Image (cartoon, rainbow, N blue to C red):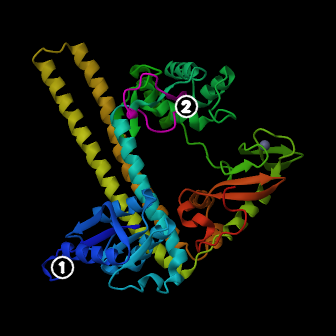
């Protein structure tokens, strides 16, 4: 016997109407299933009561989609009519595409022919929409598990520099089974790095030199970069805190330094930043994007004067010999890669719809994060006030008070930085999406005309890596932003050979 699920939905206005009730829908669907040789899967009835069909943000529908993705035994989903499922084409086709991907039929019992309707015109567009939707669903699922883990004090991502991901021999639940522990090679050096910097005798650059000499190397190999040192010194993880989705949590991992050392480093870094003029960062447009096809290492830009002429070249950081390539040559090649990205008008329009959805969900998460941070801020401010009270009624000595206040204020600053970051991330996300839509028509030209700094933004938006061999870019890997859009290479963002990861 084949196995099916039932989905039923009724909006608030429809609830009053005859024959449209949830019970009526389920009854009709189960009768139809019985006649056609289907049985209902256990817990196979999904309902959305008092929900509009104008978006897919319905608990019953989301659970149904998750079931279709997870449960390999399902053969079909039964609905009374297509309106139950979705009110707009994009949503409808997106949902259908998920069903198709998992070999699940959609059967609308009052429109038995709907399954064969000629919607093919849209299907390219929609496969991508479906992928986006699916990644939204699975993304939410993993992030829930990860969030629980972080709440319990365990880091839920790749181990930060100086740590390794390992299995906890004393694990008591699935939350503390995989943990991060100090890496016996690099951890002592990182402790040393903080101490050196806290001594005040080093600039960031001289610290990087020093650490290279002491033998500190990044996890992925290659040479220690200034940006990694900077990021590491800024990360409160090393004294025991964790920043997760903008929230600050107490970690149970082994810290590498005392809070005081970390705090000192922040002060030194802030003062250095204020009185040094910013170095021009992207002298080399393609730094960070070029990789060696032979060994996988990163390419670096380099310039030198020879006989009064300036030579600017990129070369592999590890093979070195024989990989030197003219900068202008590679930059021209990259430009040509942009002409491989084309969008149809249809897609540009669908993209706007999708963009609006992304913007909405971005806004929701941002608000959620901000609220949590504001709550944390209020709690810290309350603690500061009670410390002041303790000082006044002599519960605290002046020294105790100062120690407590210093700590609380550092925490307060951390929260405020995170708050500022959520706003920044939000507008950055918005900008990215808007730009994506705007340049839908002629990407190569938009890139060609842009200022170098903007060019970097475009590169970042579309590409994560270009692989170089013998002076030629032989493949390009898409960025995380557009990866969902070109899944299966079927999307109307037309991608020619060599684009997809091997
Ligand atoms: Zn190489």
Mark 2 crowdedness (10 Å alpha carbons): few <14, some 14-19, many ≥20: some
Picture coordinates of residue 347 (x, y %)?
A: 52, 77
> Mark 1 and 2 residues: CB-CB less than 8 Å, in contact?
no
Asked whether the viewer can see residue 329, the reply is yes
The magenta stretch spans which residues? 154-175
Q: Main secondary structure of the magenta part?
A: loop
Q: Which residue is mark 1?
A: 14
Can residue 58 be seen at all in this image of the molecule? no
Find out if the beta carbon at label 1 lies less than 8 Å from the nearest ligand 1 atom.
no
Specify whether 185 is left or right of 56: right
The tag earlier along the polypeptide, 1 or 2, is 1
From what the image shows, is residue 37 above or below residue 500? below
Residue corresponding to mark 2: 161
Q: Residue at x 12, y 23 (%)?
A: 389
**Residue 318 shown in magenta:** no
Q: Nearer the viewer, residue 347 or 301?
A: 347
Q: CA distance from mark 1 to mark 2?
A: 56 Å
**In the rendering, at what x and y percent does residue 231 appear?**
52, 36
Is 424 placed above or below 433 here?
above
């Amino acid at each position: 016997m084949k196995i099916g699920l039932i989905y039923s939905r009724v909006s608030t206005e429809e609830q009053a109407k005859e024959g449209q009730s949830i019970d009526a829908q389920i009854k009709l669907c189960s009768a139809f299933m019985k006649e056609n040789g289907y049985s209902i899967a256990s817990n196979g009835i999904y309902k959305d009561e008092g929900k509009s069909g104008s978006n897919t943000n319905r608990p019953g529908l989301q659970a149904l989609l998750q079931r279709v993705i997870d449960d390999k035994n399902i053969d079909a989903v039964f609905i009374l009519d297509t309106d139950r499922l979705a009110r707009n084409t994009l949503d409808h086709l997106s949902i259908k595409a998920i069903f198709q991907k998992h070999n699940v039929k959609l059967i609308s019992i009052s429109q038995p022919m709907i399954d064969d309707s000629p919607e093919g015109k849209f299907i390219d567009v929609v496969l991508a929409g479906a992928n986006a939707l699916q990644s939204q669903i699975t993304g939410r699922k993993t992030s829930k598990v990860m969030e629980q883990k972080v709440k319990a004090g365990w880091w839920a991502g790749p181990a930060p520099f100086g740590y390794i991901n390992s299995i906890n021999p004393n694990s008591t639940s699935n939350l503390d089974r995989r943990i991060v522990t100090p890496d016996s090679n690099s951890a002592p050096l990182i402790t040393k790095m903080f101490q050196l910097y806290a001594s005040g005798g080093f600039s960031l650059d001289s610290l990087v030199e020093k650490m290279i000499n002491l033998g500190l190397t990044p996890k992925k190999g290659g040479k220690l970069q200034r940006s990694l040192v900077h990021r590491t010194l800024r990360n409160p993880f090393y004294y025991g805190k964790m920043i997760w989705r903008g929230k600050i949590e107490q970690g149970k991992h082994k810290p590498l330094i005392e809070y005081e050392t970390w705090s000192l480093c922040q002060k030194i870094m802030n003062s250095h930043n204020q009185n040094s003029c910013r170095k021009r960062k992207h002298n080399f447009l393609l730094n960070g994007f070029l990789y060696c096809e032979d060994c996988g290492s990163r390419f670096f830009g380099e310039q030198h004067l020879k006989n009064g002429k300036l030579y600017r070249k990129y070369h592999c950081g590890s093979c070195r010999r024989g990989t030197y390539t003219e900068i202008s040559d590679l930059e021209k090649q990259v430009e040509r890669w942009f002409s491989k990205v084309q969008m149809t008008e249809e897609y540009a329009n669908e993209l706007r719809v999708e963009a609006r959805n992304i913007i909405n969900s971005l806004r929701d998460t941002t608000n959620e994060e901000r609220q949590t941070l504001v709550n944390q801020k209020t709690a810290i401010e309350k603690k500061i006030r009670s410390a002041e009270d303790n000082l006044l009624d002599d519960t605290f000595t002046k020294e105790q008070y100062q120690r407590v206040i210093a700590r609380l204020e550092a925490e307060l600053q951390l929260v405020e930085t995170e708050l500022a970051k959520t706003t920044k991330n939000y507008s950055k996300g918005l900008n990215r999406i808007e730009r994506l839509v705007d340049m839908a028509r002629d990407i190569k030209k938009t890139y060609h005309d842009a200022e170098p700094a903007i060019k970097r933004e475009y590169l970042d938006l579309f590409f994560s890596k270009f692989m170089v061999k013998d002076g030629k870019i032989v493949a390009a890997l898409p960025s995380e932003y557009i990866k969902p859009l070109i899944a299966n290479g079927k999307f109307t963002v037309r991608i020619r050979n060599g684009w997809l990861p091997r």
